């Protein structure tokens, strides 16, 4: 049977692949500790689940909705944006999607033609480049240097820009590094994008998960010109522990949102109705659970960071947000006789029974990603096993 070239060239998600390997070993009875998938380990708050149940029992969730999402939810998103971004958006500037991942996919389908370029800072979330390629665009990678907290500069962007550059992706707080761009850095980048008529794709999915007094600055708030040049991508998955509900949203230029809505009408029809009513409660209801979860992640980060940093050879920047550590393990691998991070991670899983995600899938082949969206008992034991694995390899050599 024939497969398309795009399907054959597509790289699978390394995060989902790592999680699948961990689950396969668990199914065989192996005591694997998985720190792979980027999802909160909390269950969805009760008030949100109850809203979905009510929508189901009342019959509201039984039917198709508008392709852009139910009006009540889009209005709630507008209120959310006004509260956290201090900017008013019309309902026509908002689309609800089947997860933030589909919002990004849909956006690239709407704005890219064959050969159009999208600048992607490295390290990057694993799906950015693949989604650009699926829209026949060209990902252009720019290295965020370790000494600059993995963040890119205007000078680097200017060097990467060509006549084919259409968009720039900014993910702050970042997956996988957890680093946050400052207001000054964002202002410089935003003004550069406006000057060059380059669309800013602001992936703000981790914006409510910020720790230790650090602050998230939405780039869309910095000026009217920058706001008009920005499409905000967000959703309820990380903030409200709703990864399985698959509700994201995009906010920005009405023409782009309309194009995205037309694409959704011919692909997904509409986001799941019950999930939309759940998301409505998430955004407009009691926010106590958000702070409780954020505080729990912060506590884990502050306990886990020094333990991981103490692993021989590890170089590590302390994250400011999200729920990942992204240590450079080049020296660790050298101590243990490895020169390939994929093999290192594979052996850690098979022999140490700890599942991490290789940094190669994020454009950083000297790193690994550790998710601390797990209980402290699991995190503590996982680090103990990692230490033991490294020490055993060093002693063996």
Image: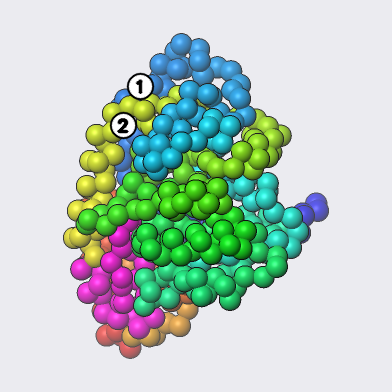
Q: Position of residue 286 (x, y in %)?
A: 28, 28
Is 194 magenta? The answer is no
Q: Mark 2 highlights which residue?
A: 45
Q: Visible in this render: residue 131? A: yes
Determine whether the residue tagged by mark 1 lies in a helix, strand or loop. Answer: helix
Q: Is residue 239 above or below residue 339?
A: above
Residue name at image x 53 percent, y 32 percent: 90
Q: Would residue 133 be found to the left or right of residue 178 on screen?
A: right
- Can you say whether 128 is above or below 224 in the image? below
Which residue is found at the position 25% from the left and 54% from the top?
211
Tell me if mark 1 has few (under 14), some (14-19) or many (20+) residues whose alpha carbon lies within 10 angstroms of its own.
some
Q: Residue furthest top?
A: 58
Q: Is residue 329 magenta?
A: yes
Residue located beneath label 1 in the image? 50
Pick the quarter of the image with the C terminus.
bottom left
> How far apart are the two marked residues, 2 and 1, measured between alpha carbons?
9 Å
Residue 21 point in image, percent of width and height: 46, 57
Residue 350 visible in the displayed image: no
Of the numbered discs 2 and 1, the one sitting upstream in the chain is 2
Give the quadrant of residue 120. bottom right
Which is more toward the observer, 213 or 61? 213
């Amino acid at each position: 049977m024939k497969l398309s070239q795009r399907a054959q060239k597509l790289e699978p998600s390394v995060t989902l692949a790592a999680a699948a390997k961990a689950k396969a070993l668990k199914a065989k009875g192996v005591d694997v500790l998985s720190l792979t998938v980027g999802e909160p380990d909390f269950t969805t708050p009760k008030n949100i689940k109850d809203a979905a149940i009510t929508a189901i029992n009342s019959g509201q969730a039984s039917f198709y909705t508008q392709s852009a999402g139910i009006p009540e939810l889009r209005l709630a998103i507008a209120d959310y944006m006004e509260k956290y971004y201090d900017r008013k958006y019309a309902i026509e500037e908002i689309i609800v999607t089947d997860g933030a991942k589909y919002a990004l996919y849909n956006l690239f389908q709407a704005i890219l033609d064959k050969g159009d370029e999208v600048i992607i800072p490295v390290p990057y979330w694993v799906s950015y480049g693949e989604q650009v390629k699926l829209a026949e665009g060209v990902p252009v990678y720019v290295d965020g240097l370790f000494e600059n907290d993995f963040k890119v500069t205007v000078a680097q962007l200017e060097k990467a820009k060509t006549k084919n550059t259409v968009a720039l992706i900014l993910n702050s707080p970042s997956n996988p590094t957890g680093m946050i761009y400052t207001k000054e850095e964002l202002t410089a980048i935003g003004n550069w994008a406006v000057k060059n008529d380059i669309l800013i794709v602001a992936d703000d999915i981790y914006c409510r998960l910020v720790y230790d007094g650090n602050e998230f600055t939405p780039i869309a708030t910095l000026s009217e010109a920058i706001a008009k040049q920005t499409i905000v991508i967000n959703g309820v998955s990380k903030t409200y522990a709703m990864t399985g509900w698959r509700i994201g949203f995009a906010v920005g230029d009405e023409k782009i949102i309309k194009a995205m809505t037309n694409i959704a009408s011919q692909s997904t029809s509409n986001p799941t109705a019950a999930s939309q009513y759940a998301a409505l409660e998430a955004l407009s209801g009691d926010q106590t659970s958000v702070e409780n979860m954020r505080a729990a992640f912060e506590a884990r980060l502050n306990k886990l960071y020094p333990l991981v940093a103490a692993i021989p050879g590890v170089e590590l920047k302390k994250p400011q947000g999200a729920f990942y550590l992204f240590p450079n393990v080049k020296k660790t691998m050298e101590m243990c006789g490895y020169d390939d991070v994929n093999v290192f991670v594979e052996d850690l899983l098979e022999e140490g029974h700890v599942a991490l995600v290789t940094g190669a899938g994020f454009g950083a082949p000297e790193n690994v990603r550790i998710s601390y969206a797990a209980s402290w008992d699991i995190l503590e034991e996982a680090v103990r096993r990692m230490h033991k694995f490294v020490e055993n390899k060093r002693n063996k050599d």
